[in-house]
Amino acid sequence: MHQSLSPAVAARVAAATTPSSTERHHVYVNLSTYPDSMAGEHGKDGGANPDWVSYGPGTNIRVPAHSLVTVTISQYDGGEAITNPWFAKVHGTVGGTETVNGKPVTQVDPEEIGHTWTLHAAPTAQDSLFVSAPLPAVPDSAPLAPGSAYPKPIEVTFSFYTKSPGKYVWNCEFPCGDGYYAKFGGPMSTRGYMSGTFTVT
Ligand SMILES: [Cu+2]
């Protein structure tokens, strides 16, 4: 099946804020996770699989080398227990933490996971980069936000440093897809939903 991929989500570059290096950029990447595909890169009708969970606004991310990257994810989806509780912990971020609605944590409840954002190297020779941030589930009982098709999101923020230029990939490690392969099918194994590229230039 052909999947059209969105243009890269470019990092917003702000002034360097790290006192250790005047040349280091601090960039910001804003993503969202949705319980369907109606709000991301697949268009308002959701494309071929409107009921598939998705990341948005796109899944291909581009950031500068040797930068501090701050990622904020607005998590709109529900969830359940994660099969591998290691991915309920935060890995590879500055301070080993993420903030969940502003509160710093090193892990979240493994029984209530919506998705993860897990970045790793492609199997080629390049600097290692591994970051994994768990996204807590929005409770099923949460009401829809006024004027929205979704409840109020849980805001997760974390930061990490990029090294030299390289090509990386990220994916969700919560089995939120279809059932054939223990829910690693469908949106979990199709580009543009629960995975994408992460290009350091
Ligand atoms: Cu997921």
Image (cartoon, helix red, strand yellow):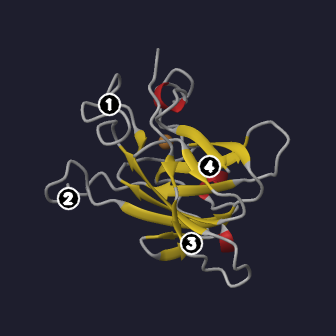
Give the residue type that dot 2 points to: Ala
Q: Residue 2 vs residue 117: left or right?
A: left
Separation of disc 2 and disc 3 at Cα? 25 Å
Please report the residue visible at 50 percent of the width from the left and 38 percent of the height from the top: 194
**Residue on which disc 4 sits:** 118
Instruction: Answer whether residue 145 is visible to the viewer in this image.
Output: yes
Label 3 element class: strand
**Residue on which disc 1 sits:** 51
Tag 1 near tag 3, CB within 8 Å: no
Relative to 59, residue 69 above or below:
below
Please report the residue visible at 55 percent of the width from the left and 56 percent of the height from the top: 134
Q: Which mark is residue 105?
A: 3
Residue with the most extreme right position: 125
Give the residue type that dot 4 points to: Thr
Figure quadrant of residue 67: bottom right
Please report the residue visible at 52 percent of the width from the left and 20 percent of the height from the top: 180
Label 4 element class: strand
Tag 2 near tag 3, CB within 8 Å: no
Would you call the spot at circle 3 few (<14 residues within 10 Å), some (14-19), or many (20 or more)? some
- Mark closer to the chain start, 1 or 3: 1
Residue 82 percent location from the top left of the image = 55, 46
Q: Residue 112 vs residue 172: left or right?
A: left
